[in-house]
Image: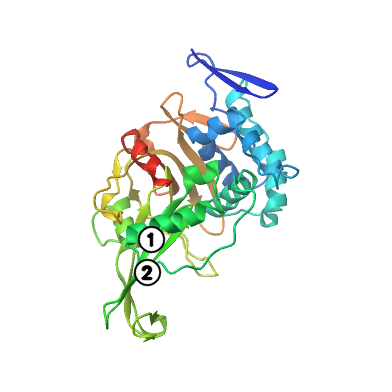
Amino acid sequence: MHLLNFSSPNKCLLFFFEQNKSPQGLVGLKNLGNTCFMNSILQCLSNTSELRDYCLRNIHHSDLNNNCKTNAALMEEFAKLTQNLWTSENNDAISPSDFRSQIQRYAPKFVGCNQQDAQEFLRFLLDGLHNEVNRVTIRPKVSVEDFDHLSDDEKGRWMWNMYLQREDSKVVDLFVGQLKSSLTCTVCGFRSTVFDPFWDLSIPIAQKNSGEVSLKDCLRLFTKEDVLDGEERPTCNRCKARRKCTKRFSIQKFPQILVLHLKRFSDSNIRGSKLSTYINFPLKDLDLREFSSESGERPVYNLYAVSNHSGNTLGGHYTAYCKNPTLGEWYSYNDSRVSPMSSSQVRSSNAYVLFYELAPSSHSKYQMCRL
C-alpha cells in the first residue's frame, strides 16, 4: 500500500493506491455519442503522471489565473474528472458529461455528436487548460528586436524567455518545446533562423517499397531539408530578393512530454484517404539526439500512452493504450471498457497520437531549460 498525503487550503485528500485490491486509474468513460475521440485523449492525459498529480493535489487552485478565477470551469471539470478516475471505489465507468459541457463552451466546434479528430481535440483542450492556469496575469507587449547578431543558441533562449513572459503554466512546463527552422539562400549562402514553440509535432508518414517503416524514418522525413523554389521562394534578407532556398527543421528545446501526431489523414479538404501504414515505434529508449539542434544533447523518451484510430475517414473509432503509472502495466481503454494488455500489443497500424515522457536520466538536464 502506498499512502500519499495531498494537502491544500481547506481540503485534505488522502489517496490509497492498493495494488492488490482496486487499482485506481482503471476506470472507463461512457460514450456520450461519438465521444470516443474525447475519451481516448482524456485517458492518455489521465495517465500523464505529473498532470494527474497536479489535479489530485488541487495545485491548480493556486495557479488559477486572476483573470480566469471567475471562469475556470474547464480546469475545474478536468481536475474533477481526473480525481474521479483515480479515487473511484469501484471500476464502474464514469460519465464525462460535465467536462464535455465545459469543453463545448470553450470550443463550440465540439458541440453536437459528430466524430472529431483526437489530435485537434487535444490541442484545444491543452490550450484551454493553459489559459486558465497561466501564471502570467498581465502579458507584456511583444517587443520586436533584432536577434540576428546572436548565436542560434542565444537567440533560441531569448525567444523562449520571451514566450514564457506571456505563456507560463504547468501545462507549458510539461508539453511545450521549441522548434528551430533554418532557411538558407542558395545564391548568397545567408542563413536565417526562426524559433517557435510547439505543443505537439505532426509527423508525415514515411513510405517504403520494402522493409519496415520506423518512427525515426518519419522523424527524418519531418526534419529533412526541403527546397523552396518557384512560387515558394522566400525573400532573402541579404539579397533583398526572392531566392531559391533550403529549409530544415530541428528541435531546439525538448519538452518533458513529447506528443507525436502521425499524419494518417490527407491534408486535402475532402479527407478521402487514410494511411494505415504500420510504424514501428519504440516503447522505451527513443533516442532523439539526431534531431536536436545541439549535437551534445541526448534526449531519451519512454512511451506511456497511445491514442488509436481504427476505421477510415468516413467512420472510425478511437481507443487508448496507456501504461498505468502506479502499476507499470499496459491497459486498453475502449470507452467504458478497460482491460489489461501485453506491451507487445501496443504497436499497431491504428496508432495515431503517441505520448512520450522524457526518461529520468534526461529529465534533470532539461529542467535547466527554463532560463
**Residue 155: which numbered mark, if any?**
1
Type of amino acid at the residue the image marks with label 1: Lys
Relative to 99, 23 lies left or right: left
State the image coordinates of residue 287 (x, y, percent, origin top left).
Answer: 28, 45
Residue 76 placement (x, y as % from top left): 68, 37
* Image disc number at residue 1: none
The image shows residue 301, relative to residue 24, as above or below, that is below
Residue 264 seen in the figure: no
Q: Residues within 10 Å of mark 2 (few under 14, many from 20)?
A: few
**Residue situated in front as seen by the camera: 255 or 309:** 255
The answer to the question of whether label 1 and label 2 lie on touching residues, with beta carbons closer than 8 A, is yes
Q: Please give the name of the residue rendered at 39% of the width and 46% of the height, measured from the top-left corner.
A: 369
Q: Secondary structure at mark 1?
A: helix
Instruction: Return the x and y of residue 94 as percentages of the image width and height.
Output: 65, 31
Return the mark for residue 148.
Answer: 2
For marks 1 and 2, the one nearer the N-term is: 2
Where residue 86 sits, quadrant-wise, is top right
SS class of the residue under badge 2? loop
